[in-house]
Image (spheres, grey):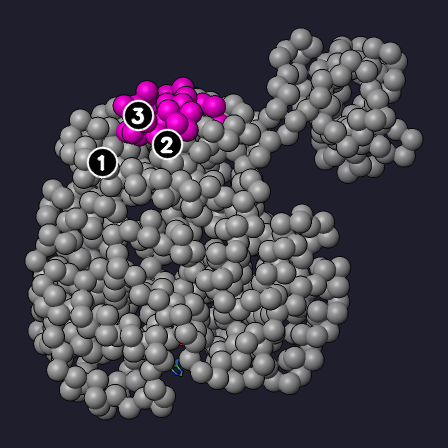
Amino acid sequence: MRPDILNPLFAEATALKGVGPTLAKPLERLGLRRVVDVAFHLPTGWIDRVVRTKLMQADVGRVVSIVVTPVEHRISRSPRGPSRVLATDPQGNYVSLTYFGGSSGYVKKLLPLDEPRQVSGRLDQYGQELQIVHPDLSEPGEEVREREAIYALSEGLTSRRMAQLAAQAVERAPVLPEWIDAGLKERRGWPGWREALARVHADPADAVARARLGYDELFANQVATALVRASTRARKGRPLVGDGRLRDLLALPYALTGAQARTVREIEGDLAQASPMLRLLQGDVGSGKTLVAAMALLIAVEAGAQGALLAPTEILARQHGETLKRQLAGLPVQVAVLTGRDKGRAREATLMGLADGSIDILIGTHAIFQEAVSYRDLGLVVVDEQHRFGVAERLLLQAKGRSPHLLAMTATPIPRTLTLAQYGEMDVSRLDEMPPGRQPIETRVMSDGRLDEVVNALGRHLAEDRQAYWVCPLVEESEKSDLAAAEARAEALRRRFGDRVGLVHGRMKPEVKDAGMAAFAAGRTAVLVATTVIEVGVDVPNATLIVIEHADRFGLAQLHQLRGRVGRGGGNSVCLLLRGPALSETSRARLALMRESNDGFLIAERDLELRGGGEWLGTRQSGEAGFRLAPPDQLADLLSCAHDDARLLIERDGGIEGARGEAARVALYLFERDAGVQLLRGG
Ligand code: ADP
Ligand code: MG
């Protein structure tokens, strides 16, 4: 049970003043359903504004705050033209306050003549005039914040509104017992949890407070990890010893790579133990994880048990199903696929086969662990693209069968420094060797000013009967604009290439999305315009060109994954990274790194170093790993610290039963890592 002290935080967001159905929607789009989500929706940056008593040319480009008096309404003649209000500062200098899209009546009411107002906004030069577009208004004398937080937003929200909601959420937040080791807290100069939260929202530049919040999240993760590990080790599973009879029948057109062979041996060793395997298989895109999974599953079947392979999406599940059925054709092994879309008789038949043991290997999505699905004897579970699943799901699946062995696979290249901490509860195997004959992908970085050339190159590519991906930018502000960008791009490309252009995005109904993917895989469309939904696993060998717009907005790990969509066939593949006009040094260096290396692990390692400059922007990337608060550039440091501290808690301070454990337990629930606690109870 969640400690009562956390209840105010886990109330619905509508408990906040002013949040009704209208505001709940844009919040929901940001994933902010509860007060705690709002509290943890940290500012992504800030604006510094200068308070002035006089308008000055020198402030053009800055956000200024100044008291001015409206002297003239200049209403546009055309109904859609902007409305301007001419105003003067105390010295009589003019500024035009400009409103687009508002009715003139509205603007007149907003800024009556001769009534001084405090306005804030970016001072622009418009012809001869100074102007501020859509200024924020307040009464003269009202306090003006010199630093204002900026938040990730969705349509219907402003940063100001978000700040107010965050302030309310902080208000509701209780003072929590301290879970951080006293010595550590003092050394780092960290405030208490609630104070840290308040500080980050009040001053987004407060690095110390941010570090504390990030640490908390990592600490909760590490404690959960340590608990899972301890309980798994204590569990009794069953040893699975294969006799090789199925693996020997496997007719592969190639030999295992050294790394694959080594990994299979490691897995074989784990499976032979009574305590369940808990192993992570890390391997770059294309390193051949599927074959390792197949070997592991065959060992389980040889030992008389069943195996299951969990994939994050329907399309990947089907793809794995086909690959495995093809590979295992002729072997006395029954393979079935089950996803949420299988209904009726086919589903019934599969369920029967699982229950009576006639199905040896099941491949599917979450559906394979629903309650209705019961296995005769599930001995091994393989999870593909591990980073898509949380601890909770892993635990759910382990509840099936008698503590089955677990093999988790991921292509997300995590720097070595982070692996131990991130997957601390697991043993790790690495596929650090690519199958032979792989053509490296040629990567080029181009300015998006050269879009026409890119489209021409695409035309030549298609003329050779090849296919291509076109990935649209990740727009930070909202998912909607992601979508708009993708739709607009598809539209533009259709004008040139007609109905050979397909489109898939994350907001489509899964069936529609899969149909779009399938059309591309079958070659019915030649260009697939997509948001990042193609990130994971899809395999279309004839697609040998990928264009990624606004590549500078992606995390490198993600870029690398996207790039891995090509280079799967025999021919040369090309990845075009389009960049925006103004790039920071870091962004430049990061894109250059993509150009120079095809090695996911190297890229991850270097990316971590490069982003050391305090860019908070990369949160999406750490988000992939399930962390929302930890500042990416401090992840490595904070994680190893949290790892050690969690160990101290478990080994020295009596675990979550001891005095400090009480507080740690609160942290587990606060960050919803409580699955670890429940596991202990249930186990
Ligand atoms: P990933 O690790 O990204 O899941 P896959 O398992 O999809 O990689 O393998 C990528 C490709 O490499 C597949 O087409 C697979 O058949 C091929 N492959 C796997 N192992 C070998 C090998 N030892 N030698 C040659 N090709 C291999
Ligand atoms: Mg794969």
Mark 2 or mark 3, whichever is nearer to me:
3
Q: Name the residue carrying label 1.
A: 649
Q: Name the residue carrying label 3.
A: 182
Mark linked to residue 150: none
Q: Residue at x 67, y 83 (%)?
A: 463
Q: Quadrant of the N terminus?
A: top left
Identify the amino acid type marked 2.
Val
Q: How many marks?
A: 3
Identify the amino acid type marked 1.
Leu
Provide the residue span drawn in magenta. 171-200
Q: Residue at x 16, y 53 (%)?
A: 232
- In-front residue for pair 147/462: 147
Q: Name the residue carrying label 2.
A: 36
Q: Position of residue 218 (x, y in %)?
A: 35, 41
Query: Disc 2 to disc 3, how far (Cα)?
Result: 25 Å
Check disc 1: other Cα within 10 Å, few if <14, some if 14-19, many if 20+: many
Disc on the earlier residue, 3 or 1: 3
Which secondary structure lies at badge 2? helix
